Amino acid sequence: MKKRLLAIGVAAPLIFGFGLAGTAMATPGTLDTCIPSEGSTTEEETGWLTAPPDGDGWEVIETQTVVDVEEETLTEFLVAFYQQTDWVLAAPEGEGWVQIEERTVIDQEYVPGEYEQTDWVTESPGEGWTQIAERWVVDVEAQPEQGTPTIVIPNPDYVPGWTETIEHPAEYKTVHHEAEYKTLWKYTKHGGHGFIWVDNDDYKYIVDGVGTNDKPEWWEFKTFYERTQHTKQELVKEAYDEQVLVKDAWTETIEHPAQGEETIEVTNPDYVPAVEEQGHWEYKFARHVPAIPEESHQEYKFAKHIPGEWMTEVPEGDGWKVKDERTTVITEEESHEEYRYSRTIVIDPVECPATPEQPEPETPDTPDSEEPVEEEAPTNTPQARQRTVTPQAEAQAEVQAEVDELAHTGAEQHTGAITLAALMALAGGSLTAIRHRLARR
């Protein structure tokens, strides 16, 4: 239901655009039913436009300037060139140089001629000088010899001969003697207990202290000992050290000879040798110096000037000067004006006369009903019998059904829609257009 209401509200400005605003009333022969409505005022505003919208009553409420193309500028400099040289001998290379000054530079002042003479010197000053005098100058006077070149003196390093006696003690050496042992053999008593140790095993038996290899007979009833395999070492002499004389004490005599000479010949420190006369020659020179003429050369100053020229960048280097500066517009700014419009739509109230033959629409049971419920008119009345259904009446009936449905919803915002439906009926629009609009809702 809400969707249908919005469609009607959008169509309202279109109708007003055709100059149908005013008091809506039933026109005889156009509609069979008058639809009452209350008056209303609606404020309508547009977005930003470059021209007024269609329709009457629009007034500009706000204006703005929209920049389409930004302005572009370029900074330029009026640059001139002026350069001046120092004093030079000739114009610099390149074109444009103009001489602005000239001067004469003295390289050699004029010197008049003269006669020159040296003092006493040892050699000529150089070319052009003539010797005019000489002399011998004694530097060292001659002297005779004093003393002898050498003298004889006692030798301080002389050592006379002498005899040396050395007493040498006796010489000994230590001899180490190892301990001495001897081997003893054990002889066991035959026929009893006991044994003896003998320092040799030459005999197998010891009979009465005498060694023998013959065993005594039993009837001899002799006590004897028989050799066994047991031995032992018996210390005979312990180890000791013995000092053995190697050489007896003796006396040594050494004769030391004399060292060096008793006297030596040395340089005489007081000797003064003979000195011959020593000296040198000195001379005097003279010359005639001619006059020296003046020498000079010309020097110049040059300058170069280039008139000012507009540039976007100042060249580097000496001589360039910025005379002026300006800003040039490359691209003009382009813009257009946009406006917002507003208008007030006034809908007058509609009052309908009483029509007893027109049955009032029945209120639907539910506000959200999609289709209005129409009540069939009684057929037994004269008006019903004489009524002719025309396309215009059929369209008005559809509008009336829609109005009835909106009227029973109780919403204030539907008033404009109801009035719109009535005005559409009064306008006498074609049935096809009305049905098309209703279908879009």
Image (cartoon, grey):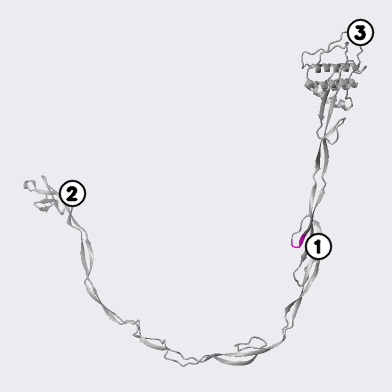
Q: Is residue 307 magenta?
A: no
Residue at 84% x, 28% y: name it: 344
Report the residue marked by disc 2.
Answer: 230
The answer to whether 88 is drawn above or below residue 68 in the figure is below
- For the record, the magenta segment spans 317-321
Quadrant hosting residue 384: top right
Mark in front: 3 vs 1: 3
What's the residue type where badge 3 is placed?
Answer: Pro
Report the residue marked by disc 3.
Answer: 382
Q: CA distance from mark 2 to mark 1?
A: 144 Å
Q: Number of numbered discs present?
A: 3
What's the residue type where badge 2 is placed?
Answer: His
Point out which mark residue 1 bears. none
Sequence-wise, the earlier of marks 3 and 2 is 2
Q: Which secondary structure is most common in the magenta stretch?
A: loop
Are the residues at dot 3 and dot 1 in contact (C-beta closer than 8 Å)? no
The answer to whether 145 is drawn above or below residue 43 in the figure is below
Report the residue marked by disc 1.
Answer: 306
Residue at 81% x, 18% y: name it: 406
Q: Residues within 10 Å of mark 3 (few under 14, many from 20)?
A: few
Query: Is residue 359 rendered to the left or right of residue 280?
Result: right
Place of residue 167 in the rendered image (x, y in percent of width and height, measured from the top left):
23, 74
Q: Is residue 320 magenta?
A: yes
Q: CA distance from mark 3 to mark 2?
A: 184 Å
What's the residue type where badge 1 is placed?
Answer: Ile
Mark in front: 3 vs 2: 3
